[in-house]
Image: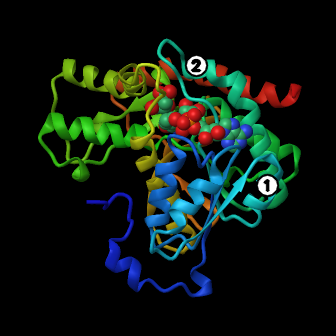
Amino acid sequence: MFSRLSIGVAQVVRTFSTSSQNNVKVAVCGASGGIGQPLSLLLKQSPLVTQLHLYDIVHTPGVAADLSHIDTPAVVRGFNGADNLDAALKDAQVVIIPAGVPRKPGMTRDDLFNTNAGVVRDIAAAISRNCPKALVGIITNPVNSCVPIASEVLKKAGCYDANRIFGVSTLDIVRACAFIGEAAGHNPLDVTIPVIGGHSGVTIIPLLSNCKPAVNFPESQVKQLSERIQEAGTEVVKAKAGAGSATLSMAYAGARFALSLVRAIKGEKNIIECAYVRSNVTEATYFSTPLRLGPNGIEENLGLPKLNAFEQGLLKAAIPELKTNIKKGEEFVLKN
Ligand SMILES: NC(=O)c1ccc[n+]([C@@H]2O[C@H](COP(=O)([O-])OP(=O)(O)OC[C@H]3O[C@@H](n4cnc5c(N)ncnc54)[C@H](O)[C@@H]3O)[C@@H](O)[C@H]2O)c1
Ligand SMILES: O=C(O)C[C@H](O)C(=O)O
């Protein structure tokens, strides 16, 4: 049931070898939050993770104590408060960042910029000091601006490697598989589909024409499904009615992406994920496309899949918004 996450069942966990060449240290920043806690649980459950560092400005001693009682190999340590950020990140190979505030009804993701930009900037600066070679997955919104922020901070510190910095857009793909599976009568786990672009409203570009198994929906249904995927985050924000945004589905998606990075570090071949990265595929300098992952991050950007006329329209609508979001992130680092 967890095939997309590649986390082991108990038997696998119990037989897993923890020899030193298999060590992978993962740090979660924002580990006490609505995403951070279930994400950390899924990472603790995976036999692929051997050290799990949980950083937050609150509650990490409790979260770490709780998770550390689970009988899997990952050694869990909690790091509380800004004074412990450096220790949390020391020599981490994978850093996943769900730190920062979530939306309330009526807000856009961009409305989170003023609070979350500084959070991502400070964590990126700590990454440059403690684990400049880490593969970094940014969940914090607005993702479209936060990835440029982290990139500019790492550039300033002289350790930027575009192949190692990812905006996590996996939830868009997870949702697309769920909604298309339901509409087409397929097991969602059998569905694959690239979702490209960015991670907000019109910048989310689901490519139903590239769906496998192929789907043959009428035009009106393609439009309705595409819009639902683009607005799915808002659907959850409205349903939670002031209690935040997607947390459990994001933890699932974040764990899948984090474990894909871990598997790539361990040398597994042909791991393909879409993620929002530095890109020259379109006019937008950051853009999500399918990527082949390797031990050093992006091994190959697989580029733009073939788009039909409807999808070309979605791409055209996304580019101006992406450019604005990217510029805002880059300017924030210049001025702050
Ligand atoms: N990329 C995506 O697809 C996606 C999906 C869902 C949510 N998100 C985003 O993820 C973020 C977190 O959402 P959530 O629901 O977990 O929120 P939350 O409020 O439940 O948790 C956020 C956590 O971050 C911590 N935090 C705040 N400032 C921090 C700092 N400076 N350093 C370390 N930790 C800090 C808080 O203490 C809290 O524990 C939001 O920005 C949200 O919009 C992104
Ligand atoms: O919608 C949000 O604010 C959170 C997240 O980006 C999502 O897509 O669920």
Residue 145 visible from this viewpoint:
yes
Residue 281 visible from this viewpoint:
no
The crowd level at tag 2 (other Cα within 10 Å; few <14, some 14-19, many 20+) is some
Q: Which residue is mark 2?
A: 321
In the picture, the quarter occupied by the C terminus is top right
Q: Position of residue 265 (x, y in %)?
A: 58, 69
Q: Are marks 2 and 1 in contact (CB under 8 Å)?
A: no
Q: Describe the element under mark 1 as helix, strand or loop.
A: helix
| Kind of residue at disc 2 | Glu
Front residue of 65 and 301:
65
Residue sitting at x 73%, y 28%? 329
Q: Position of residue 192 (x, y in %)?
A: 30, 48
| Kind of residue at disc 1 | Asn
Q: Which residue is mark 1?
A: 84
Q: Earlier in the sequence, mark 2 or mark 1?
A: 1
Q: Position of residue 124 (x, y in %)?
A: 76, 46
Reply above or below: 331 against 85: above
Colouring used for the render: rainbow
Q: Describe the element under mark 2 as helix, strand or loop.
A: helix
Reply above or below: 156 against 235: below
Does residue 183 appear to the left or right of 144 in the view shown? left
Question: From this viewpoint, which residue is outermost toward the left?
Answer: 185
Front residue of 60 and 90:
60
Separation (CA) of disc 2 from disc 1: 36 Å
Among the 4 quarters of the image, the one containing residue 159: bottom right
Which mark, residue 326?
none
Residue sitting at x 59%, y 49%? 31
Residue sitting at x 63%, y 47%? 59
Q: Position of residue 260 (x, y in %)?
A: 48, 60
Does residue 238 appear to the left or right of 59 in the view shown? left
- Whether label 2 lies within 8 Å of ligand 2 gets the answer no
Residue sitting at x 81%, y 41%? 153
